[in-house]
Amino acid sequence: MSDLSATNIPALASSAYNQALEVIAAVEPRIAEATKQELVDQRASLKLIASENYASPAVLLTMGSWLSDKYAEGTVGHRFYAGCQNVDTVESLAAEHARELFGAEYAYVQPHSGIDANLVAFWSILAHRVEGPWLEKFGARGVNDLSEADWESLRAELGNQRLLGMSLDAGGHLTHGFRPNISGKMFHQQQYGTDPETGLLDYDAVRAKAKEFKPLVIVAGYSAYPRRVNFAKMREIADEVGATLMVDMAHFAGLVAGKVFTGEEDPVPHAHIVTTTTHKSLRGPRGGMVLATEEYAPSVDRGCPMVLGGPLSHVMAAKAVALAEARQPAFATYAQNVADNAKSLADGFLSRGAKLVTGGTDNHIVLLDVSSFGLTGRQAESALLDSGVVTNRNSVPADPNGAWYTSGVRLGTPALTTRGFGHDEFDRVAELIVDVLTNTSPGTTSAGAPSKASYAIGDGVAEKTKAAAAELLDKHPLYPGLELA
Ligand SMILES: *Cc1c(COP(=O)(O)O)cnc(C)c1O
């Protein structure tokens, strides 16, 4: 299962899909059409969005069922609704696979997304701090026993909640204390960045910042940092200042699952609490998950209804299937290929003179600095999209073009590795991208001023690139055997 060509969809499943689409079309044909068209589009483009993947047919099929119809607020064996025996089976299995796969003491598989998983973790960290001395002070057995007045005085005491997270332009995520997300309202946030010379995480600088700021929580993890993180060092720093270490492995969970990141690079043995998505490099259904030490389990368990709505049972079932897939040896091969391919892609750029943030990669992300092509990230992203290459623009450290136009393009290897792309294909992808960007020039505004958005691609370049991309994609079909009517 290291690539999807190994999971050929049999004719029977193909006909089941077509019949399902007919059932949908009878109610709202435009939805059936958009669903079909999405497959056509995904098949026809080089998907390099680092946070996307292609889930297996088993994972996709698991989501389309009546498990969706069941309400199951609460936890396994402790539900607020009757008749949850099958959801209990589903949730227990998903949690068991997650614990076994990641070697975690405890797993909570209900979060609907990565953001939701982070909210559960934040709640849990705050609740955990309230437990112990605070509960004693108020003579309460659990946080649920605290009265409104108790909470009022707690809020006053805990008002100074501090969170130290990675800065956005160094690759951190909005949910790590930034203002557009509630984490930026719940916490006083300060940021650690990367070394301006090397672009690498500077642990001494993180330590100095932590000692000065004395955060309640240190968040490690990223969405756009092309390097590994030493979580043992991050834990050491957290311990020195008495902070909780939360690792958000949303992006690289697949590399942890596939044992590409081990020892000090594996967050699970080092963090108090780990959050993740299940749909990025982990290649499961769209969703989130929290892994924690036993100590944090009771408060994590209160995620629903504290910050989550009722669990999506059909998605928990698909998480169980995806996690079962990730426990197979083929997934470790896949994860290693994801990392090897990122190196091939990076080398492909470097050998053609392009500039990369940190000068390379050792995970699944390559961050291309497009300023050397005289373009903004926005212009590069658009020119590539016109050429059949789907990426997303991204800030680079100390970005002169800000977070909207940016100076970078983020690329990731998880999706195309699932399709079976290897070294040669990723080298060719780098060649195609360099060719498009070399032949793209910045445009001007209607008033004739330099524009950060408009651009012009050389004659025939987009068409030529699309044809070259199609050649690569045809060799590695997506969901082979699936023929839509
Ligand atoms: C993608 C991502 C998230 C958010 O995941 P959603 O499922 O979109 O809510 C959170 N944290 C990090 C680090 C991410 O990369």
Image (tube, grey):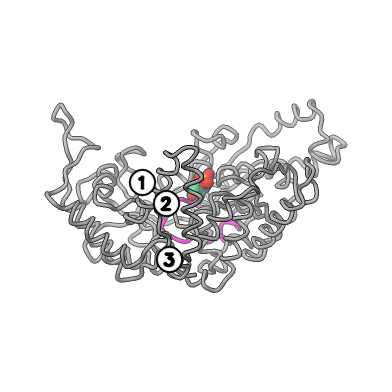
Q: Is residue 439 left or right of residue 121?
A: left
Numbered circle sitting on residue 338: 3
| Beta carbon at label 3 within 8 Å of ligand 1 | no
Q: Are marks 1 and 2 in contact (CB under 8 Å)?
A: yes
Question: Considering only order in the chain, which callout, 1 or 3, is on the residue closer to the N terminus?
Answer: 3
- Along the line of sight, the residue nearer the viewer: 338 or 467: 467
Question: Considering only order in the chain, which callout, 2 or 1, is on the residue closer to the N terminus?
Answer: 2
* Residue 415 shown in magenta: no
Query: Disc 3 and disc 1: Cα gap in Å?
Result: 20 Å
Numbered circle sitting on residue 304: none
Kind of residue sitting beneath label 3: Val
Numbered circle sitting on residue 224: 2
**Alpha-carbon neighbours of circle 1 within 10 Å: few (<14), some, or many (≥20)?**
many
Residue positioned most to the right = 139
**Alpha-carbon neighbours of circle 2 within 10 Å: few (<14), some, or many (≥20)?**
many
Could you say whether the residue bearing mark 2 is in a helix, strand or loop? loop
Kind of residue sitting beneath label 2: Ala
Say how many tags the image has: 3
Instruction: Give the residue drawn at x 76%, y 30%.
Output: 151
| Beta carbon at label 1 within 8 Å of ligand 1 | no
Q: Which residue is mark 1?
A: 394
Give the image location of residue 45, x and y in percent. 32, 54
Which residues are the magenta region? 222-237
The image quarter in which residue 46 lies: bottom left
Give the image location of residue 262, x and y in percent. 55, 68
Give the image location of residue 317, x and y in percent. 63, 55
Kind of residue sitting beneath label 1: Asn
Q: Nearer the viewer, mark 2 or mark 3?
A: 3
* Residue 230 shown in magenta: yes
Question: Considering only order in the chain, which callout, 3 or 2, is on the residue closer to the N terminus?
Answer: 2
Instruction: Give the residue drawn at x 16%, y 43%.
Output: 456
Query: Disc 2 and disc 3: Cα gap in Å?
Result: 16 Å
